[in-house]
Amino acid sequence: MRILFLACLRANTGNSTTADRIKSHLEAAGHECELRDSAGLQCPLEVAKLVSQRKFDAGLAIHVYKAGRFLLANRIPFGVIFGGTDINEDVKNEEKYRVMRAVLEDARFAVAFTNKMKKVAEKLWPQAISKIHIQPQGILSMPNLSFDFQAFLHNAGMLQIPGKTHIFLLICGLRRVKDPLYLVEAFAEWHERESSICLAIIGPMVDPLFTNEVKVQLHNVDGVHLIEEIPQADLQALIKRSFAVVNSSLSEGMSAAILEAMDLEVPVLARNIPGNAAIIRHEHTGLLFSNPKEFVKLAKRLMSEPDLKRKITNNAKNYISAHHSWELERKTYQNLVHICLTEEL
Ligand SMILES: *[C@@H]1O[C@H](CO)[C@@H](O)[C@H](O)[C@H]1NC(C)=O
Ligand SMILES: *[C@@H]1O[C@H](CO)[C@@H](O)[C@H](O)[C@H]1NC(C)=O
């Protein structure tokens, strides 16, 4: 089957990794799958043309509103995957809500990443209840085994004290909502007393204006490094070499970086917000902090209590295998496409 897959691909690495992964699941089942950026589309008509020219048999979209609406009024069967903004933002707009209802009416299946998301969606669109499935994001980490860590540290201007450097890694797109500077002051102070501690902030420089602001603010700060985005496999290698992965943002949703760190058996220190508390149980699968001071306290504990670190990374790895299985995700999408999109309903 030829599948047209629409997703918002720019400015959000999380979304496009998910899309790539699902695409690979479908290709593994023998389908052809073409991924298109929904942000570049204007109207359903444009998609209709694409469908008839390129002879697509079925459609799939991540984000009911931002992408799914373009599949309306096409004759191909399609499925949708809920995106965070569908349920957190777009639904508040009456016109968008109406469009999403139409999309869900026509869609043959809808996927929610979490049970909570499914519950909310069912309340909003009760007529779609029977179509909504839960499938958490699958995690499959494949770190670049030949990643040159020393060269990376050197290029990033990071001082390497052999066997001693503790890198805390904050992975995030540079946008104000991600609050990347939340821990900077605490780190600078800590670094002054313990020079082996450093914070590396890494991610796409999404907002150029804000990126500049961050650069200016970090200019005279020792112990905090801003690093431009690197390929996914290299990033995973870097996670593996870090002491801990940090999440300090206030935004909603589920952080793929956190899940990957858990899979790579690297401890996670995350701000105590609903999205993070949904994946991390404090002192069990990670550590949750509520302010910079508490962050430093917990980070120090993690450094001085190897047993705590071992317990957390073991539990986290088990959690990922049980709840974010890549194999299960593959089966779910292959089945949904096979059952819902190939057979005439
Ligand atoms: C892996 O790391 C090496 C050394 O840093 C680099 O040359 C290579 O391009 C990386 N490979 C991938 C697939 O990213
Ligand atoms: C932190 O976690 C939240 C919730 O899990 C997520 O939405 C956000 O993108 C993450 N941010 C960073 C900087 O990792």
Image (cartoon, grey):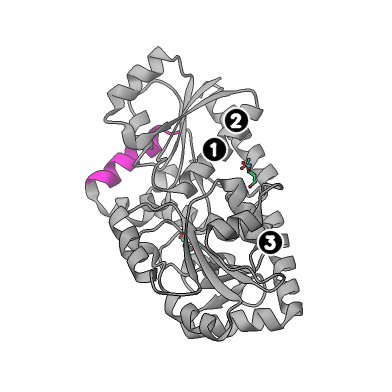
Residue 332 shown left or right of residue 225 in the figure = right
Disc ID at residue 253: none
Query: Going 59% across and 23% down the picture, which residue do you hit?
Result: 31
Query: Going 32% across and 54% down the picture, which residue do you hit?
Result: 207
**How many numbered circles does the render carry?**
3
Q: Circle 1 sits on which residue?
A: 20
**Which stretch is magenta?**
95-107
Task: Confirm whether the magenta stretch covers residue 102.
Answer: yes
Residue 286 shown left or right of residue 187 in the figure = right
Which element carries disc 2, helix, strand or loop? helix
Give the CA separation, mark 1 to mark 2. 10 Å
- Mark 1 vs 2, N-terminal side: 1
State whether residue 108 is above or below residue 121: above
Q: Kindly tell me whether residue 231 is visible in this rendering.
A: yes
The amino acid on which the numbered mark 2 sits, given as a three-letter code, is: Leu
- Mark 3 vs 2, N-terminal side: 2
- Which picture quadrant has residue 167? bottom right
- Mark 3 vs 1, N-terminal side: 1
Q: Circle 3 sits on which residue?
A: 319
Task: Confirm whether the magenta stretch covers residue 319.
Answer: no
Give the CA separation, mark 3 to mark 1. 23 Å
Q: Circle 2 sits on which residue?
A: 26
- Circle 2 crowding by C-alpha within 10 Å: few under 14, some 14–19, many from 20: many
Q: Is mark 1 within 8 Å of ligand 1?
A: no
Q: Is mark 2 within 8 Å of ligand 1?
A: no
The amino acid on which the numbered mark 1 sits, given as a three-letter code, is: Asp
Residue 305 shown left or right of residue 9 in the figure = right
